[in-house]
Image: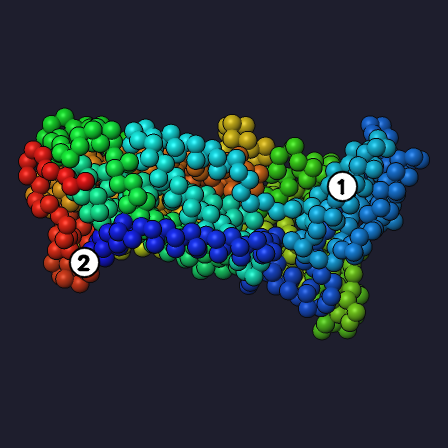
Amino acid sequence: MATFLYRLGRGAFRRRGRVVLIWLGVLVAVVVGAAGASGPSDEEFSMPGIESQKAFDLMEERFPGTAADGATAQVVFVAPDGQKVTAGDTRKAVEDAVGSLGGGPQVADVEDPFASEAVSEDGATAYATVTYKVEPSEVTDASRTAVDKAADQARAAGLTVETGGSAMDSGGGPGGTAEIVGLAAAAVVLLFTFGSLAAAGLPLLTAVMGVAVSLFGIVLLAGPLGLSADTLTLGMMLGLAVGIDYALFVVSRYREERGRGLAPQEAAGVAVGTAGSAVVFAGVTVVIALAGLTVVGIPTLTKMGLAAAGAVTVAVLVALTVVPALLGFWPNAVLSRRVRKAGTTIPRDRDRGAGGRGNLGARWARVVLRRPVAVLVLGVVGLGALAVPMTSLRLGMPGDEAKSTATTERRAYDALAEGFGPGFNGPLTIVVDARDTADPQAAVRTISDRISDTDGIVSVSQAGFNEADDTAVFRATPSTSPTDEKTKDLVETIRHDRPAVEERASATFEVTGTTALNIDIAAKVQSALVPYLVVVGGLAVVLLLVIFRSVLVPVKAALGFVLSVLAALGVLVLVFQEGHAADLFGVEQTGPIMSLMPIFMMGIVFGLAMDYEVFLVSRVREAYTRGETAGQAVVSGFQHSARVVTAAALIMVAVFSGFIGEDGSLIKMLGFSLAAAVLFDAFVVRMAIVPAVLALLGDRAWWLPTWLGRLLPRVDVEGEGLGHARSDSPGPYPDGSVEARV
């Protein structure tokens, strides 16, 4: 692989103009295509096979043409203190506002709160429901504006009016602030790392280019594939983070090879052949992990995973082609000032390996080598303590209650909960199949009465039958909120008591609705967490076994990955579920963790962790194969790679942290957890635990049974085979200095 990438890097450097034009052509093509695309949709989560989804499908079958997935908007009216919405001028203001909601070609129906009994017991709150003929993603701005105008009309009369519902969510996607924060932080880290504006700017430029291609590509495919707005933000987050890091690795190795005396084109080839191999490996692991999300069985999760995998693939291709091409335009601009001033004679770094004092990375490695047991115990115990809260992890699907109180959706949610009870925002939908019953009406009454008597149910609506009079639907309102653990217990109780109820009614029923669907999805995802973690960890062992040709190094890497993921999940539970330091991160409402978040995080962190592992340990192995002792090899590896890995990790943390300020619950949690996971994995696992374990293992770290060595394919990540492919090399490096051809 290293030889192929070496030739790719040299070719991109030599044909730089053609490479850049091709990528610009790709960018223009996706921009033009995206301009006429429909954009992201607001597709609801679904999971074939679970009870709530089966009930929803039954409703679609037995109630044809009802647009069960149609958009709805709720307008909540709250009377001034001490007054009622049913009194005099206040009632007239509500009726006038509701009357104005009926216009518009997309409106199917408007429920008058006074006719539909949508008024709270104290008379202080009422709500009107607007049903549309189209799905949420197809609601136009004109339709939303009509709702806003009706709300303003009632506000002018003195009422407090808030709006919510799927129709009022105009989508999302990258807002710009998080990206600007991430880019600014990355620029500072790169400038400090390289000491050169050009070297700092090149990774930023190529990352932005790759992200642009990915985002416009997602927009282009969003309509046909049903991609959500969160997919755009996830693509932006991952594309920006890995794009900068991958380019950073290549540019750093290019500068190192130039410092050793190689000509620009040769240095570009070696950089892509060595650092590029680590980039390819890291990118492939992320892609495999994200694509592996298809096994969970949630279509939305599958689409998000595949779209994110596409963004990572683009980032890898850009790092392997555009970066060396741009280096070809400005071969000396990315070099440090010291090297540029040296002219044609570039002094070689005499402070390599275990000899000499070395840079900060080498000095840190020596500290770990002197006290490996203490460092190992401290690292494992510290991460283990942070992972403990993960044992109380609760998964769910937070809705409007998790949004900021500055949004009208959150205020509408709170007003409905206060006026009608916390369970009003998440009623259970009961679907009764009475096709094989002689008296469907009696069967539905029996089921309705038994569910009404269940502890935790405050009200049951009147059942509605289909035209065939063999299927009925009614709503059961819990006394607790949709994300409350008691609501989950209530759903389990109803399902547990179902056999006896069905036997008495001679009909079957299923529980669905948004609340039940979210509970089922959470249960399914939670049951998939451990198997997915085992699969991803096992994949890490196999891949690293091939890369490093060692048995113990892959096991150590996989265990370190698991430790950092569990610690990140533990911190996530502390902040988002239990509320510790919640204000610091803008978390206004604690509750369950987004169902999709942990499994997403595992896939992403897996690739990033393997990225740092390969970049660090490959340099250690390279030194070891040159004849250095196990301890000296650790110092040499950290001498060359610790600074770059530190910079890459800081960039990742900065980019991911910028997304904590986003409004979407999934993106906010994902940004926080990824920042925490990278922080733990890079600075505790890779920088502390890894050298400590390598120091304790010594030569045994690189042990591989002979029979296994014959079976494993040879993947040249360190570039050992480049000597056969290089045609423009100055030969072996002598001590002292070499003459660089510039």
On the image, the x and y values in percent for residue 35 come to: 57, 53
Give the structural element (helix, strand or loop) at label 1: helix
Up-down relation of residue 6 to residue 500 (above or below) = above
On the image, the x and y values in percent for residue 356 come to: 11, 27
Report the residue at 15% width, 41% height from top. 741
Left or right: residue 324 compared with residue 709: right
Q: Which mark is residue 714?
A: 2
Three-letter code for the amino acid on which mark 2 is drawn? Arg
Report the residue at 43% width, 43% height from top. 208
- Give the camera-side residue of 360 and 120: 360
Residue under pointer 1? 148
**Closer mark to the observer between disc 2 and disc 1:** 1
Q: Quadrant of the C terminus?
A: top left
Quote the CA–CA distance across marks 2 and 1: 64 Å
Q: Around disc 1, counting alpha carbons within 10 Å, would you say few (fewer than 14), some (14 to 19), or many (20 or more)?
A: some
Three-letter code for the amino acid on which mark 1 is drawn? Asp
- Give the camera-side residue of 73 and 392: 73
Q: Quadrant of the N terminus?
A: bottom left
